[in-house]
Image: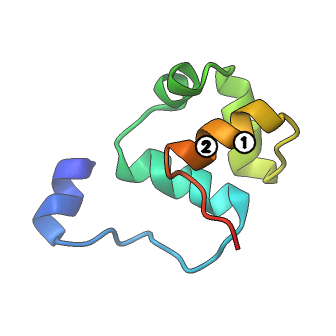
Amino acid sequence: MPKVFEFLGYFPFESNALSLRDQVKAYRIREGLSLRRMAKILGADPDTVARWENEGRLLNRVLLKKLKSLGVIRTK
């Protein structure tokens, strides 16, 4: 997918929403990562990443810090 976005010159799924769920999913798609690969980068379970994308809840402060350091999520 990253090559498609490069060809288009923009990320067509980008939203201005600041929800955790939207930011995690947008980052994963933009970077061309599978749930499994994203989970491996974060040291999390793929089901956990799927839960973030579907439910928007994140309970682990360590993983939240990792998401922030990678630039996956923005703070208000």
Q: Name the residue under label 2.
A: 67
Q: Residue at x 27, y 48 (%)?
A: 1
Identify the element where label 2 is drawn. Answer: helix
Label 1 – label 2 distance at C-alpha: 5 Å
Instruction: Give the residue pinned by disc 1.
Output: 64
Rate crowding at label 1 as few (under 14), some (14 to 19) or many (20 or more) other CA atoms within 10 Å.
some
Give residue 57's position: percent from left, percent from top.
Answer: 84, 49
**Residue visible at 67% across and 35% down?**
49
Residue drawn at 58 percent across, 25 percent down? 39
* Location of the C terminus (image quadrant): bottom right
Asked whether the beta carbons under mark 1 and mark 2 sit within 8 Å of each other, the answer is yes
Residue 63: percent from the left, percent from the top?
71, 33
In the rendered image, residue 21, in percent from the top left (x then y), is placed at: 69, 56
Is residue 46 shown above or below 24? Answer: above
Q: Is residue 50 visible?
A: no
**How many other residues sit within 10 Å of disc 2, few (<14), some (14-19) or many (≥20)?**
some
